Amino acid sequence: MDQEKTERQEREILQRVALAAVQEQRRARRWGIFFKLLTAAYVLVVTLAVVIDRLGDTKRHGSHTALVELNGIIGADQKTNADDISAGLQAAFENKHSKAVILRINSPGGSPVQAGYVYEEIRRLRKKYPAKKLYAVITDVCASGGYYIAAAADAIYADQASIVGSIGVLMDGFGFVDGMHKLGVERRLLTSGKHKGMLDPFTPLNPQDEQHVQTLLDTIHGQFIARVKAGRGSRLMSDPQIFSGLIWTGEQAKVLGLVDGLGSASYVARGIVGAEDIVDYTVKEDYLERLAERIGVALGRDLAARVVGGSPRLR
């Protein structure tokens, strides 16, 4: 009897295990179908977006004002970088139906190297297409590297409340020497080269290193000033404060000669260029790259959910 009871219990356990496995397979198939449908729907939406974007390009066959956006911090590893900005500007200038180009800027600045690249590209394109004007239009902020680029334009427009200027260069950091001394922490820094540990925050500031860095900053500042003067010319007031790193409102900047007028991109397109239709040439994130990234995230989450049992969790 005990043997029969044991065999019956074993059969019941096997049946429950088999049933659980079948249920798990069904759940896995349902989730698989769900993710396939979700992926297909996402691909369809992206494809439609691409088609609509391409159809929007047909506007470029009529007379229009070209627009390129410059938003955020300027840097080689940022979304706002010289390669993308230059590519947008090139496409805008090359299109024979664009009457003029607007570079709409909202940036606190960034890399002087990246800003310099864009500045030179604007000068090159203006020389190559002398009949096509480039207008810089400032929205909220056009400071430091942002203004560096704007100075290359034929004319600059801003809102009366825009923040403009900050023509200067900075390098910042911290010093923890006193704090380490109070904590009884010893700094052990080994270098090959007398100045290799220059500006190390855990060692006292060396006056010779400080002077060297100050010379670098002054040199870059001088390059910045030269580019602004070359771009703005006699429109600038003779006021040393312009290059002191100060910022001004758009209204004040107009008096100083940092901008030529007050107005938005639509105002410039309508009232200055004479082509009210605006076509955006800004280089956008690639749809397929975005799709691949999001699908990868979704699949990664699904895999993680399976590993931990598929149940919701608080974090």
Image: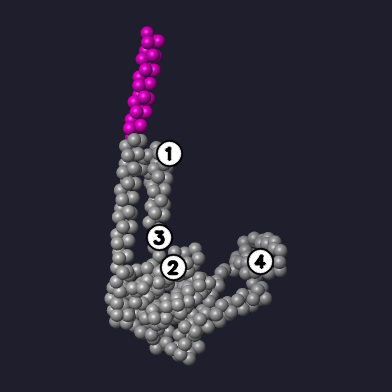
The residue indicated by pointer 2 is 87
Where is residue 178? Give x, y as percent.
62, 68
Mark toward the start of the polypeptide (4 vs 2): 2
Mark toward the start of the polypeptide (4 vs 1): 4
The residue indicated by pointer 1 is 307
Magenta segment boundaries in residue numbering: 1-27
* Dominant SS type (magenta): helix
Question: Looking at the image, is mark 3 or mark 1 nearer the viewer?
Answer: 3
- Give the alpha-carbon distance from disc 2 to disc 3, as whole Å: 13 Å
The kind of residue tagged 4 is Gly
The kind of residue tagged 3 is Glu
Question: Looking at the image, is mark 4 or mark 2 nearer the viewer?
Answer: 2
Q: How does the figure colour the protein chain or chains?
A: one colour
- Give the alpha-carbon distance from disc 3 to disc 1, as whole Å: 32 Å
| Disc 1 element | helix
The residue indicated by pointer 3 is 285
Residue shown at the point (35%, 35%) measured from the top left: 28
**Quarter of the N terminus within the rendering:** top left
Image-quadrant location for residue 70: bottom left
Q: Is residue 37 above or below residue 225?
A: above
The kind of residue tagged 1 is Val
Q: Is residue 155 visible?
A: yes
